Amino acid sequence: MGGTEDWRDQMKGRIMSLDDLKERMFPEMVITEEMRAAERVFPVSTTSYYASLVKTPDFQDPVFAQIVPRGDELRTPPWLVEDPLLEKTFSPVPRLVHRYPDRALIVATSACASRCRHCTRKRVSASTQESAISSSELQACCDYLRKNPAIDDILISGGDPLTLSDEAVAKILSPIVSVPSVKVVRIATRTLVNMPMRFTDNLVAILRRGKPVYVNSHFNHPVEVTPAAIAAASKLTDAGIPVASQTVLLRGINDTPQIIEELCRKLFHNRIRPYYLFQCDLVYGIEHLRTPLATGLEIMKHLRGRLSGMAIPNFAVDTPGNGGKIELLPQGILRREGNSTILVNSRGIEVTYPDP
Ligand SMILES: *Cc1c(COP(=O)(O)O)cnc(C)c1O
Ligand code: SF4
């Protein structure tokens, strides 16, 4: 399956349940009662394109494990909550989240092409209703941006904004880029991964029409970097739209130094800049996918010694409450000695660096 198919057929023909997935894609797949119970709380939906990347229909498969619920999703230890980043608290007007002085996030729609089991906005994607921003809500968001000119960077997120039609995307972008203080827009989308045929010539033309736009995607595993995804990303970069990727560390899916190294290399070689490597958020339903912080630090240490800085993402935790994103680094500073700092490199060698 490639980039020739119409994305609207992918959206309309989405696989919408475990039974549907078994019937249409994986007749040999086993569906347990536990999986059905989890599905009733957090529904299933995916594109036939993304499901076609599954090699074996079991939880060892990195794509299958991102699509299919496990009974574990109903296990909720006390540190997991519905809205760990307090996005509801930091929403001054509906659909706008303002947590950092110069940036704001707009939730354009609750729909996604494929629902990820690890989604940080499970409260949004768990709802079966797919609702897009209305023109009055958009108006209110733009009024807020006009009143807060310190915000110069807008993230359009969801859900996935590129599940909307070209006309709807243009209608959302146009009033936002008309706010004089807005200098740059970032589109947060997973369609490069789960529906790369979305990037039609018309969409690319819409994205480059106004102010500078970045496309931020979400690749979690090298198998997702397919020829179709690479072709779509190239189309964007050729049109002057930089493409970046955020990866979420997921237990049993991508939590080894080798997998992340391969992913970062593949992305970098195709002009997709690895931007963040995220620790899982403390959102309900994902305890079984969480890794200890030490795993991410180990992976960063591995990458540091091998890859160009251009290919290395920032390892970050979006902390609960109002902590915001905190970047974590494997140890670089060992200690102070007089006027000097003792540093350690990726091979464990100590270096003395004098201050002026
Ligand atoms: C993550 C996030 C941003 C963007 O942060 P960057 O580090 O600039 O990518 C903006 N607003 C909200 C609410 C966020 O959660
Ligand atoms: S595409 Fe993004 S918003 Fe949609 S389910 Fe996946 S992580 Fe959540």
Image (cartoon, rainbow, N blue to C red):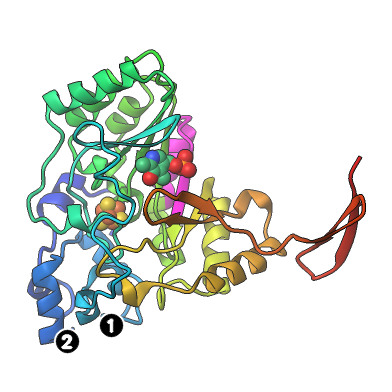
- Residue at image position (23%, 74%) is 73
Label 1 CB-ligand 2 distance < 8 A:
no
Q: Decide: is 295 above or below 335.
A: below
Residue 236 is covered by the magenta coloring:
yes
Query: Hey, which quadrant is residue 8 in on the image?
Result: top left
Secondary structure of the residue carrying numbered label 1 = loop
- Does residue 169 appear in this view? yes
Specify the amino acid type for callout 2: Val
Q: State the extent of the magenta-drawn residues as a range.
A: 230-246
Name the residue carrying label 1: 58
Circle 1 residues within 10 Å: few <14, some 14–19, many ≥20: some
Q: CA distance from mark 2 to mark 1?
A: 8 Å
Residue 160 is covered by the magenta coloring:
no
- The picture places residue 120, in percent across and down from the top left corner, at 30, 57
Q: Which quadrant does the N terminus fall into?
A: bottom left
Specify the amino acid type for callout 1: Asp
Name the residue carrying label 2: 30
Query: Mark 2–mark 1 contact, CB under 8 Å?
Result: yes
Q: Quadrant of ligand 2?
A: bottom left
82 or 212: nearer the viewer? 82
Secondary structure of the residue carrying numbered label 2 = loop
